[in-house]
Image (cartoon, rainbow, N blue to C red):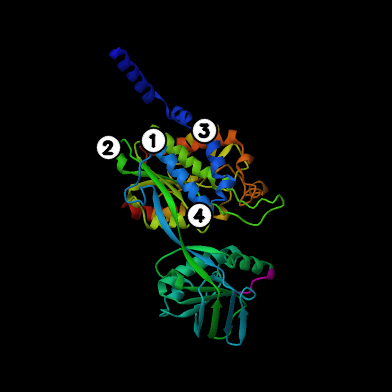
């Protein structure tokens, strides 16, 4: 009997080792489990998984329970029992009143100026004009504790979308220079100004800590303030500190040398919570496509790799507060639990929906040397891997992957198949009807399997994983890895 048992065990072991990568994926990724995960994460019970809410707390507990059940290990240095990374956020309620006087020009809150960042204050003084607020403009003066005046955008870009993009760059410069307040101006058209006020006159989140809340940043609706003296009053703005968390877990690789290298599999698990009821009296933004799908691709990879370990080690990171401004990933990138130099690749999973069930859309497919691996994984399940069909929308830099790309880690984003950001995408993107029962699970099964196979191929490959030469993040990669 002993020899029979040993023979059975050896046959079982041989079978496991003889399985192809595709067979290993098919064994662990099935439609019923995909549906069960998505239906829970996108359920009304979780109330849209808003950052800091009881719903996202339930989601985090669910994710940790699943990771533990697969055998995913805690991460040394992580919080709690090793599966969390706690983050403090500043939650801000908009100001109730505000008035700004520049020379003989008067600006009223929301009519003529909007608070981008701020606090309750009553102050006066003079303004230093820094033109567009380019890097060289900030270097011309000692700006510690000063208020500055900036034109919106740049000399080359006065587009509405450009205002937001360049504003973030100017905020960073202002903080670095010790600026106390920024007045940025543009003669906004009425229709666009309504959007500006709606966007900024709302509850907001930021990472708490340091002195970031000391900066005043206002958008003014005017052609050009003609004086350098000002008086400013902001009242009724409320701040509170709340806590949320990233969910993390790790699995060790099998190769004696490659196990010191990590591949990160990431997705954000938050969504936008509850809003005004629609015509069907539905007020919950369930976030099935954005981003329960992404979360479940990571869970599916964790289950697969736990059963069939890869040569490289794996780190699974599920970010909070992506919808608030990529804050969970920003916090992790600045406070890594695994040194960035040990992370050879990250692929993030995020998206707004799909309109083509024959493809997977990898944002950044052509930007790293792993293109052939993504193509192989998709072909195995009857899909085609395509790159971002809408490069003008800058999706690569608008998801959690960007914080890792900036430090040099090759980091594309794996999305469901879309060939245009069209009406079919917008029908569900950030809408209350983005629910679990509105998706094609035959397609999702192929999509999930292609993602998990991509993970296996990348984590086991002998080929170099890096940026394609000439990529904007190529030099950052060379610096990070000492190439």
Q: Nearer the viewer, residue 241 or 256?
A: 241
Q: Which residue is mark 1?
A: 306
Q: Tell me which residue sits at (41%, 37%) in the image.
A: 69
Judge whether 108 appears above or below 367 on screen: below
Mark found first going from the N terminus, 4 or 1: 1
- Residue 189 picture quarter: bottom right
Q: Position of residue 21 (x, y in %)?
A: 43, 30
**Cα distance between the residues tagged 2 and 1:** 17 Å
**Cα distance between the residues tagged 4 and 3:** 31 Å
Q: Nearer the viewer, residue 264 or 214?
A: 214
Q: Secondary structure at mark 4?
A: loop
Q: Nearer the observer, disc 2 or disc 1? A: 1
Mark found first going from the N terminus, 3 or 1: 1
Q: Which residue is mark 4?
A: 322
Q: Nearer the viewer, residue 306 or 71?
A: 71
Judge whether 140 appears above or below 447 on screen: below
Q: Secondary structure at mark 1?
A: helix
Find the magenta span and give its range: 186-190
Q: Which residue is mark 2?
A: 256
Q: Which residue is mark 3?
A: 379
**Cα distance between the residues tagged 2 and 3:** 31 Å
Q: Position of residue 458 (x, y in %)?
A: 41, 39
Q: Nearer the observer, disc 2 or disc 3? A: 2
Mark found first going from the N terminus, 4 or 3: 4
């Amino acid at each position: 009997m002993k020899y029979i048992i040993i023979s059975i065990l050896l046959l079982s072991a041989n079978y496991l080792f003889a399985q192809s990568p595709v067979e290993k994926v098919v064994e662990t990724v099935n439609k019923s489990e995909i549906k069960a995960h998505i239906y829970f994460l996108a359920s009304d019970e979780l109330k849209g998984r808003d950052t800091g809410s009881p719903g996202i707390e339930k989601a985090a507990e669910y994710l940790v329970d699943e990771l533990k059940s697969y055998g995913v290990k805690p991460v040394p240095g992580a919080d709690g029992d090793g599966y969390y990374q706690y983050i403090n956020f500043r939650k801000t309620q908009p100001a109730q009143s505000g008035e700004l006087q520049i020379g003989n020009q008067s600006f009223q809150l929301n009519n003529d100026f909007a608070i981008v960042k701020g606090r309750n204050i009553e102050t006066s003084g003079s303004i230093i004009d820094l033109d567009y607020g380019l890097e060289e403009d900030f270097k011309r003066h000692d700006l510690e504790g000063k208020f500055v005046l900036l034109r919106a955008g740049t000399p080359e870009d006065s587009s509405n979308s450009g205002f937001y993009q360049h504003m973030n760059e100017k905020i960073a410069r202002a903080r670095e220079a010790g600026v106390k307040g920024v007045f940025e101006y543009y003669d906004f058209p009425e229709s666009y100004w309504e959007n500006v006020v709606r966007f900024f006159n709302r509850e907001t989140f930021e990472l708490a800590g340091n002195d970031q809340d000391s900066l005043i940043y206002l958008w003014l609706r005017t052609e050009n303030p003609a004086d350098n003296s000002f008086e400013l009053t902001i009242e009724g703005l409320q701040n509170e500190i709340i806590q949320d968390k990233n969910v993390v877990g790790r699995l060790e690789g099998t190769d004696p040398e490659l196990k010191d290298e990590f591949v990160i599999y990431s997705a954000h698990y938050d969504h936008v919570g509850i809003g005004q009821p629609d015509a069907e009296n539905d007020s919950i933004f369930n976030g099935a496509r954005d981003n329960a799908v992404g979360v479940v691709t990571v869970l599916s990879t964790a289950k697969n790799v736990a059963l069939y370990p890869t040569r490289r080690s794996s780190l699974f990171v599920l970010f909070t507060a992506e919808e608030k401004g990529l804050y969970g990933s920003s916090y992790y990138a600045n406070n890594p639990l695994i040194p960035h130099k040990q992370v050879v690749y990250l692929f993030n999973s995020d998206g707004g929906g799909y309109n083509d069930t024959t493809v997977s859309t990898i944002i950044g497919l052509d930007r790293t040397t792993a293109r052939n691996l993504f193509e192989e994984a998709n072909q195995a399940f009857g899909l085609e891997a395509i790159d971002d069909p809408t490069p003008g929308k800058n999706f690569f830099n608008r998801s959690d992957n960007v914080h890792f790309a900036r430090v040099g880690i090759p980091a594309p984003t794996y999305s469901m198949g879309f060939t245009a950001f069209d009406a079919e995408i917008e029908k569900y993107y950030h809408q209350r009807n983005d629910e679990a029962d509105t998706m094609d699970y035959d397609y999702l099964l192929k999509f999930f399997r292609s993602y998990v196979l991509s993970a296996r191929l990348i984590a086991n490959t002998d080929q170099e994983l890096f940026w394609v030469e000439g990529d904007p993040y190529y030099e950052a990669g060379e610096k990070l890895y000492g190439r």
